[in-house]
Amino acid sequence: MVWDFKKELGRKVIHLFSIFILVVYNLLAQTFSHKIALLILAAFLILTIEFEYLRVERGMKIPILSLLWRYKRPKELKRLGGEVYFLLGAILCLALFDLRVAVAAILMTAFGDLTAGIVGTRFGKRRVSGLPSKTWEGAAAELLVNLGIGFLIIRSFVDNKLWWMYSLMPNGDIFWPVVVSMAVVATLVEVLVSKLDDNLLIPLFAGFTGQMALMLLGLA
């Protein structure tokens, strides 16, 4: 089975699901509480795992979900798909880290990985030594996107609020040490990991790095 650009694009577009996760969490957390929001996301994770059980263990085909399953990588055909690990990583980030760090880590996982996959597949010419599936072009593009995400998200509070809660324009001081450390770690994990699922590792490693940086700088 040839893994071509169209399949890569289709698979990465699914990562836009991260926006849905963050919107749902934010609405539930503001309407009810942080704990309730996490429990709802956990319920959705369980439902996703149940669908994966039917697909992997029982070989069932569910019409609507089959449209998404067609974009799975060959290695995912007989094991849990990346969406399960992505959702698990998002829940852990939201539960463990500062909200700014959690949001940035989740978006880096989605859009940084998306960029690396599309740019690397479409335009990648220089392969990373020892990692034939990764390209320097993809890694560079991902790093730029991750830095951009950090630039937008990792900022100081304004009137004890996060800027995206009340404005369409970024506001607040940028915490560059946190931004750079998270962007570099997220990019390195995506480049270096090929057998483990980076949908879980990227948000956890980048989120942990960002949280530690916040604490060391006295910003948490």
Image (spheres, rainbow, N blue to C red):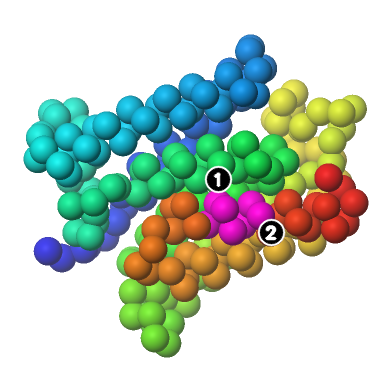
Q: Quarter of the image for the C terminus: give it.
A: top right
Mark linked to residue 106: 1
Q: Quadrant of residue 60?
A: top left
Q: Horizontal placement of 24 versus 31: left or right? A: left
Please provide percent x and percent y for residue 140.
54, 70
Q: Quarter of the image for the N terminus: give it.
A: bottom left
Residue topped by disc 2: 209
Dot 1 amino acid type: Ile
Please provide percent x and percent y for residue 19.
50, 34
Q: Horizontal placement of 138 versus 167: left or right? A: left
Decide which of tag 2 and tag 1 comes sooner along the chain: 1
Residue 10 visible within the image: no
Residue drawn at x 41%, y 76% is 135
Magenta range is: 202-208
- Kindly state the secondary structure of the residue where label 2 is placed: helix
**Extreme residue toward the bottom, this view:** 129
Please provide percent x and percent y for residue 146.
60, 57
